[in-house]
Amino acid sequence: MRYISTRGGMAPAPFSDILLGGLAPDGGLALPDAYPTLAPGELSGWRGLSYPELAFAILRRFADDLPADELRALIDHTYTAEIFRSEAITPLTPLADGVWLLGLSNGPTLAFKDIAMQLLGNLFEYVLLKTGGHLNIFGATSGDTGSSAEYAMRGKRNIRVFMLSPHQKMSRFQTAQMFSLQDPNIFNIAVRGVFDDCQDMVKAVSHDADFKARYAIGTVNSINWARVAAQIVYYFKGWLAVTDRDVQEVSFAVPSGNFGNICAGYIAKRMGLPIRRLILATNENNVLDEFFRTGVYRVRPTDQVAQTSSPSMDISKASNFERFIFDAVGRDPAVVRDLWRQVDTQGFFDLSGSDAFHAIQESGFVSGTSTHQDRMDTIRRVYQDSGSGIVMDTHTADGVKVGLEYREDGVPLICLETALPAKFEESIVEALGHPPERPAGYENIEALPQRFEVMDADVAEIKGYIVRYAG
Ligand SMILES: *Cc1c(COP(=O)(O)O)cnc(C)c1O
């Protein structure tokens, strides 16, 4: 398999060449030159597989330049009961008749990003050891991504992580989760400012090509292809768990922000997994719901992004969306370049009435928006209906709310659970009147000693810091 760029300007490259990268050199995103497809009978052969076996069966197609036994070992080392707290890795819980919750958030940071990020940590270390290189990951976080990256990269050889976060603006739980890491390759920097100040510092450094090259600066943001690839696996896992015939269609409800999670579901479907509907749920920041309803993709200025109680879905633009649009416009990079030029100049593009949009609407994508009140109502209703057994987090609740609107008789519906409620205690208290249970080991996380540096939002200062500590 070779990878190409959605903007058409990258020579076809194998998986290990694009693994460490963010954007392709031409500003596009990497995608396989053709999706692998299932052979007849292949799905039924996968029914008895464990999570790591299934992950290997799927990921070997996308990483076919890595020696199979080494890929296998990396996967086995990643998807363990110690790290994900059960052999199932992604356990399934019945929610109602024909409706399930697929638990994706049992990794170390209690959010679904761990599933891909934990593998990424092992893949990065493996490739760097082979090439003799090193990497300084530099990023900004308002919560989930940064902690997931740190827990994936902690203790990894030849990798350091420099993570900016807004000083005293994350939840106490999230702060404790990140700052309690004592690994010498993890550098937490609390910036006096807001998240946008952190992001601006990262942008300023990434525009300095000399500095980036000299200090081997890299990122782990959601456009990394390997993250999307690793997420394909659990769509198969969920499908296999609720079906007994190979043609049976299943729908998935996906709480969405940057379109990474649901992009993986779309690719699973392109590989031949019988998915009926991909139900995209947004919160009040409904850029993507607007697109799937109208054909208009309108990004929001950052000052118009609402701060909601499902904060990991508070996005101004959906950074993985370009992959999907590339396919929708017949993989014509000239069209993609033109559409994103329109986004840059006028803030939107409009595909309504086009053949591409018609095909998208036929392809099983549907969408909806969920508000704060919807989240509260859904958390409360599921809690009551389950006899106090199920407490969902706010992001998962967005997905369940929209998913149930599209539920069809006779079609199993799998709602993806993207975080545990313990991460968003305040909202659970608001919905249920009491805090959620914390998983074992997280009870007193706020009391652990913390290790971090406080800094002004000053690009020269952060560069100096990186120079001092870079590997
Ligand atoms: C990142 C995140 C999302 C959004 O996923 P995308 O891949 O960006 O669409 C949803 N819920 C939680 C809890 C997240 O951390």
Image (tube, rainbow, N blue to C red):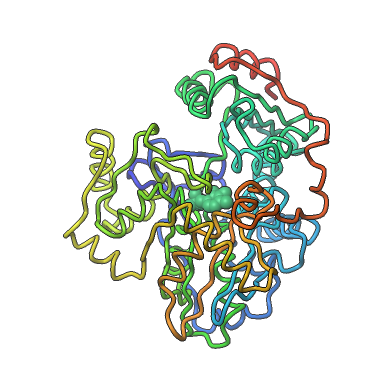
Q: Residue furthest front?
A: 433
Q: Is residue 453 left or right of residue 268?
A: right
Above or below residue 209? Residue 170 is below
Above or below residue 365? Residue 118 is above
Q: Is residue 96 left or right of residue 448?
A: left
Residue 227 appears in the figure: no
User: Which one is nearer the viewer's eye here, 173 or 387?
Assistant: 387
Q: Quadrant of the C terminus?
A: top right
Q: Position of residue 343 (x, y in %)?
A: 27, 39
Mark count? 0
Q: Position of residue 19 (x, y in %)?
A: 55, 45
Tell me which residue sits at (46%, 80%) in the image: 249
User: Which one is nearer the viewer's eye here, 178 or 386?
Assistant: 386
Q: Residue furthest left?
A: 353
Q: Is residue 448 left or right of residue 310?
A: right
Tell me which residue sits at (70%, 69%) in the image: 389
Q: Quadrant of residue 461?
A: top right
Residue 258 appears in the figure: yes
Q: Position of residue 264 (x, y in %)?
A: 49, 59
Q: Quadrant of residue 242?
A: bottom right
User: Which one is nearer the viewer's eye here, 146 or 441?
Assistant: 441
Above or below residue 282? Residue 17 is above
Tell me which residue sits at (54%, 19%) in the image: 211
User: Which one is nearer the viewer's eye here, 404 or 4?
Assistant: 404
Q: Position of residue 259 (x, y in %)?
A: 44, 52
Q: Quadrant of residue 131?
A: top right
